[in-house]
Amino acid sequence: MKTTRTITRAFCVELQQELSIVAARREYFSQELPRARFSFLCSSEPCRASGVKITGVRYDVKPQEHLTFVAAHYRANPNYEHHPDCEWVDPEVTLPAADETQAESELRRVKRKLDDYIDVFDPTVKERPKQTATAGKADTKPPESAKDPSSSTDILKAKQDKQNRTSNLERLVDSFRQAQASLSKEELALLTLRVPGLGEVSLRAYFRHIKFAQLNDDRRVLYGGGLVERYGIGFKFKFFDRLQGKLVTLYVSPAQMQAYRSSRYLSELLSHADEVRFFTVFALGTLVASPSGKSVSVEIEDLRHLAIVLGPARDGADPAKPVLES
Ligand SMILES: [Zn+2]
């Protein structure tokens, strides 16, 4: 059968685990050079057993701001048929429910424009990095897939639970960036996000540009453009925009980087500092005023609460943005 739902996870043959396309991109860029591309199979057991391939698109391209934004995503391979029990096959998903209101149908239409729509984001960091050999896996596998859907009732249950959940901030950031780039203002305003402990919030409002941030409001993803200074393998990010006239920075110590499973990926992104006009940082952290009161820092509890996107290339013609350096 053909898939009807948006494929948001696949089984990576090389890594022998199931992961989102954003996690696949992170693993791809964490490899030593020369990097090898991955092959993916369908995440559903019966499909995987019969070798049903899935295509990974653009996971070998670093997250960067472009005039035309194309998100990394999974795509069904047209040469393969999926098992009827496959989690991505759901004949009902294309049909509107009988009692669907106009607002619900509009929301469904908007969600289908996105490659990876997130319903629930759980920022809770459950395991400390490097605590156990498999600690990092929490990053690559959403909680619901930890259950083994071996019986058909489990598969049925999984199909009924059509919510996309993740605890991966970078995945949420990709989804938000695609929504910003491809939806109208009105469409973007329809999207909501459920965050345990915070409830249901508008997706747009969950992301707060640093210039609109407030010192006591720390339950939002703060973001903004800026430049990076390296301190060994650590770094300090300085936002361009000021907060109440004060400089805002985000410091990651060499020790924090050393303890982080994906530090090679972050270093790889930051290594392009000379080629891009700026970086955009997304952080789920707390704003803390410096003792002198002259600056503000964004403090993050865990590096999993940080996502970095490359700015446009320095040579790229983008007249909308000022060139930082002559
Ligand atoms: Zn399948």
Image (tube, grey):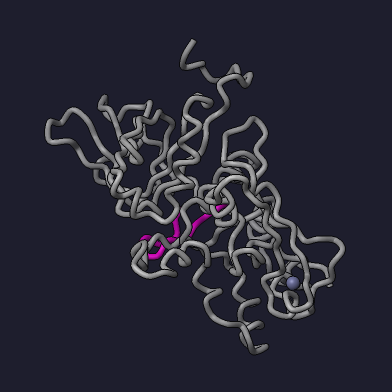
Looking at the rendered image, the quarter that the N terminus falls into is bottom right
Whether residue 159 is visible, yes or no, is yes
Give, as a single range, the part of the protein colored magenta. 189-201
Question: Which quadrant holds residue 130?
Answer: bottom left
**Residue drawn at x 29%, y 39% as measured from the top left:** 251
Instruction: Please tell me how many numbered marks the rendered image carries.
Output: 0
Q: Position of 89 compared to 173: left or right? A: right
Q: Quadrant of ligand 1?
A: bottom right
- Asked if the magenta segment contains residue 227, the reply would be no
The residue nearer to you, when weighing 321 against 310, is: 310
Whether residue 10 is visible, yes or no, is no
Q: Position of 138 compared to 112: left or right? A: left
**Residue drawn at x 69%, y 57% as measured from the top left:** 74
Residue 269 image offset from top left, x and y in percent: 49, 39
Residue 5 image offset from top left, x and y in percent: 72, 65
Give the residue at the far left of this rendering.
291
Q: Position of 308 compared to 35: left or right? A: left
Residue 94 image offset from top left, x and y in percent: 77, 65
Query: Does 153 sit above or below residue 240?
Result: below
Question: Which quadrant holds residue 127?
Answer: bottom left
Residue 252 image offset from top left, x and y in percent: 31, 43
**Residue drawn at x 24%, y 35% as measured from the top left:** 296
Query: Does 273 sit above or below residue 4?
Result: above
Query: Does 145 sit above or below residue 140?
Result: below
**Residue drawn at x 43%, y 43% as measured from the top left:** 282
